[in-house]
Image: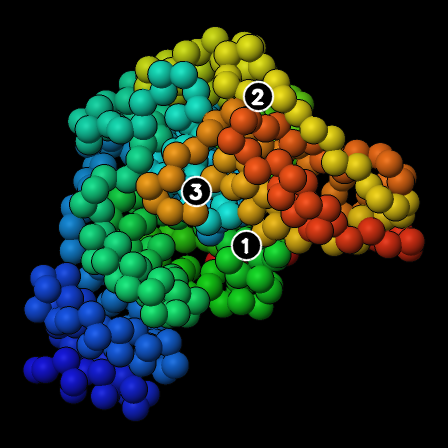
Amino acid sequence: MIPYEVILKKRNGEKLSKEEIEFMVMGYVKGEIPDYQMAAFLMAIYFRHMDEEERAILTEIMARSGDMIDLSEIGEKIVDKHSSGGVGDKTTLVVAPLVASVGVPIAKMSGRALGHTGGTIDKLESIPGFKTSLSLEEFINNVKKYGIAIAGQTANLAPADKKIYALRDATATVDEISLIASSIMSKKLAGGADAFVLDVKAGSGAFMKTIKDAKELAKAMVGIGKAHGKDTVALITNMEEPLGIYVGNSLEVLEAIEFLKGNYDEKFYELCIEISSYMVKLSGKMDEKEAKTALVENLKSGKALEKFRDLVRAQGGDERVVDDPWKYLPISSETTEIKSERSGYVKDIDTEKVGIASILLGAGRVNKEDTIDPSVGIKVLKKIGDKVEKGEPIAIIYTSKKSRVDEAVEMIKEAYVITEEPVEKLPMIHEVVT
């Protein structure tokens, strides 16, 4: 077998065998196949696509290219949650302690921010002392003792995906459904969970800009999960506006803590309860209705908040942040109000621009090596459908000396479209794919 034959076969739209896919992927990982041939192979997939079986095979090969984490020692069914990325997405910080509070163990590996979307690990590291780099033994012991652990991904988790993704990024082959789905699901399979709830975002702040594309990705990922014997559900959710109220690392931790104390944005509440109830359902402990009842009760009673405290304490963080986040989280005291230049109703928010504005302030990274400032970010005061008067604040930015304040202000102003006619508020959840 030679690379030319496999590239030609896929270029002609033919189905590839497991041996052919493995030959290309592992040959590239080992350095036996050069960049230019792998780039041609990826471009052939980009234009000719893969069917469900090919996707499942590609995912498995990438997952098995490195460590396959074994969580069986925990002794219970592990349900993982994944988001395709959005602006202000601090869902894991709420959902993980909420689900753990009803007795479903959470063993979650999360990533860092890159581009206009935030990363759970960066957010948790804004808690003073919080340790996200855990050995597998520490990770499993925390889950067994506290019912919850959230750590950064190991260096050798799906290395084939890391190498192939870097090449996709350089060859304009990132946005192909089979390649996106296999990239995400390879890391999920390698992470050792038994079932997955996927939050696939659609809109201006998401990687999938339309509901149609998000649905296609959701179906592809659910198909891959089921092909590997994993119960998988995907929710297609709205990312036409920032999620919740805050964008930025410490600010999003603050919002998660406030949520667990009962102070929450209604749409964000709807999303967290839906994701949590599906996770509990897939664990087999309760049906969806029982799960919702238990989750709401634990939110009201403070049991979910105490589980967040357990997480912080177990991973070396300063648990005083739970009681007084404004005091113990690094949040900038330098703020600037951004005011509306006209009266009317918020028609649209270019959410990607809001995400980029947060990067200009220092809350995100463009390159993997960039340093994040946990103290800066944005408070979103007006959402789609809200009435606004001229001169009324639409957002507040939290800044530092390094923040590119003028550019960020301009970017947020550009993001908002205000019209004279009333505008309907958007639904949070578009569809559930099972």
Pointer 2 or 1: first along the chain: 1
Residue 50, quarter of the rendered image: bottom left
Residue 416 visible in image: yes
Secondary structure beneath disc 2?
loop
Q: Looking at the image, is 416 positioned above or below residue 109?
A: below
The amino acid sitting under disc 3 is Arg
Residue 366 image point, x, y percent: 43, 47
Residue under numbered circle 2: 332
User: What residue appears at the point 58 percent right and 68 percent down from the top-left corner?
Assistant: 212
Numbered tag placed on residue 365 in the rendering = 3
Secondary structure beneath disc 1?
loop
Dot 2 and dot 1 residues touching (CB under 8 Å): no
Report whether 57 appears left or right of 324.
left
Q: Residues within 10 Å of mark 3 (few under 14, many from 20)?
A: many
Report whether 238 appears left or right of 112.
right
Dot 1 and dot 3 residues touching (CB under 8 Å): no
Residue 95 image point, x, y percent: 49, 33
Residue under numbered circle 1: 206
Q: Specify the quadrant that holds the N terminus.
A: bottom left
Tag nearer the camera, 2 or 1: 2
Q: Nearer the viewer, residue 107 or 73?
A: 107
